[in-house]
Each structure stands twice: as structure tokens, then as C-alpha cells.
């Protein structure tokens, strides 16, 4: 008799995998039959169709709100970054200040407090006295910066005053009685009189 391993080799050589009963599956003939919709499915479909416009509206509102938030963030972020950077720069400056910084700050602060003390009475005095005295105190220690600020402020005040004057003049005079065309013709007549006067002389 042969060894058991040779028997299994003969069995496996003689049979195919598809021929083994364990692996064979009978052929099935399937076709798809769609089920009829039940009452529950119809109600769910109806509910989805009714809710779809509201869901779309909510999605659009959410998208527009997100866009507005992003726009505001884009506008606010540079300002916040600049403020944070200014704070960090001030912190670094105050950690290692120049030797004369604190006495100067003390004098400028004292002039502001003195201005508050002297500004008894109207609100204008309370605003002008402390600000003016602090500006004078600061200009003693920082004359170049004070001159630059005074020049730019003077130019801005001059422009504002000029615009206010023009606006007030327009309000007071109203519409001029003489039309611009008549003004031009009057100027032309004056020139004609001058030219005729020159010929007579």
C-alpha cells in the first residue's frame, strides 16, 4: 500500500476545484423586481419635497453669513495685527527705555494733570487745557516731532477752515442772482470799455 501523502496527491491531481461539492454553487436566475412604495415611503418623500426649499434657503443663508464673517475678518485682522504689533513694540521699548524716558513722561503727565486742575468750568476747557499743556510739555522734549505734527495739523486745519468758509458762503448767499453766462458777458463788456477808453486817450 502507498503512503497517505501519495493518496492525497493522487486525489488532488485528478479533481478540479470546481468539481468539489464544497465549492460548487448552483446557477441562480435572478431578476430585479421593484417594490411598490408603501405609505411610509410616500410620506417621507412628500416631507422631503416640502422641506427642500427651506433647507436650500438655510444653506444659502449660512453661506452668506460665512462670507460676511470672512469679509469682516479680512477687514479686522490687519487692524488687530497692527494693534498687537504696536503693543509688543511698546512692551519691548518700555522694558529697555532710554535713560531720560521716565522723567520726560512724568513731566508730560504732570502737565496733563495740571491742565485738568486748571480746567474747571466748561467741557471745552476740560478738553483744551490738558491737551494743550501736554502738547506744550511734549514739544519741549521732542521739538522736531512737535514741529512736524504742528505743520501737518496746521495744514489740515487750514484745509478744513477753507472748506467750512466755502460751505458757509454758499449757504448764506444761496443761488447767485447772476448766471455764470451773464458774468462772462459782463467781463467781456468791461474789456470792451477798456479798449474803447484806450482809443479815446
Image (cartoon, rainbow, N blue to C red):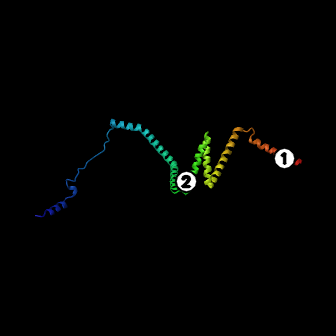
Q: Which residue is mark 2?
A: 102
Rendered view: 135 above or below 2: above
Mark 1 is surrounded, within 10 Å at the Cα level, by few (under 14), some (14 to 19) or many (20 or more) other residues, namely: few
Rendered view: 103 above or below 66: below
The local secondary structure at tag 2 comes to helix
Q: Nearer the viewer, mark 2 or mark 1?
A: 2
Q: Which mark is residue 57?
A: none
Q: Position of residue 198 (x, y in %)?
A: 87, 48
Q: Is residue 174 visible?
A: no
Picture quarter containing residue 51?
A: top left
Drawn side of residue 97 relative to residue 39, left or right: right
Picture quarter containing residue 117?
A: top right
Q: Nearer the viewer, residue 57 or 99?
A: 99
Q: Which residue extends farthest left?
A: 1
Mark 2 is surrounded, within 10 Å at the Cα level, by few (under 14), some (14 to 19) or many (20 or more) other residues, namely: few
Q: Nearer the viewer, residue 66 or 78?
A: 78
Task: Calculate the distance from the C-alpha at mark 2 to the C-alpha at mark 1.
Answer: 72 Å
Q: Is residue 72 visible?
A: yes
> Which residue is at 84% across, 45% downward?
193
Drawn side of residue 46 relative to residue 148, left or right: left
Drawn side of residue 158 relative to residue 75, left or right: right
Picture quarter containing residue 47?
A: top left
Q: Earlier in the sequence, mark 2 or mark 1?
A: 2
Rendered view: 123 above or below 25: above
The local secondary structure at tag 1 comes to helix
The tally of labels here is 2
Q: Which residue is mark 1?
A: 194
Q: Position of residue 65 (x, y in %)?
A: 47, 43
- Quadrant where the N terminus sits is bottom left
Q: Nearer the viewer, residue 74 or 55?
A: 74
Drawn side of residue 182 relative to residue 126, left or right: right
Amino acid at each position: 500500500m502507498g503512503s497517505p501523502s501519495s493518496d492525497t496527491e493522487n486525489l488532488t491531481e485528478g479533481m478540479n476545484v470546481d468539481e468539489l461539492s464544497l465549492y460548487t454553487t448552483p446557477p441562480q436566475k435572478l431578476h430585479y423586481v421593484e417594490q411598490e412604495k408603501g405609505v411610509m415611503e410616500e410620506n417621507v418623500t412628500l416631507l422631503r419635497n416640502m422641506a427642500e426649499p427651506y433647507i436650500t434657503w438655510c444653506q444659502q443663508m449660512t453661506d452668506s453669513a460665512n462670507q460676511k464673517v470672512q469679509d469682516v475678518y479680512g477687514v479686522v485682522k490687519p487692524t488687530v495685527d497692527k494693534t498687537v504689533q504696536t503693543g509688543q513694540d511698546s512692551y519691548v521699548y518700555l522694558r529697555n527705555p532710554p535713560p531720560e524716558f521716565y522723567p520726560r513722561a512724568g513731566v508730560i503727565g504732570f502737565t496733563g494733570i495740571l491742565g485738568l486742575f486748571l480746567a474747571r468750568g466748561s467741557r471745552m476747557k476740560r478738553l483744551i487745557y490738558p491737551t494743550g499743556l501736554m502738547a506744550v510739555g511734549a514739544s519741549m522734549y521732542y521739538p522736531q516731532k512737535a514741529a512736524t505734527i504742528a505743520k501737518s495739523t496746521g495744514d489740515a486745519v487750514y484745509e478744513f477752515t477753507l472748506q467750512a468758509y466755502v460751505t458757509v458762503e454758499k449757504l448764506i448767499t444761496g443761488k447767485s442772482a447772476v448766471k455764470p453766462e451773464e458774468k462772462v458777458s459782463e467781463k467781456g463788456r468791461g474789456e470792451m470799455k477798456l479798449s474803447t477808453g484806450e482809443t479815446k486817450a
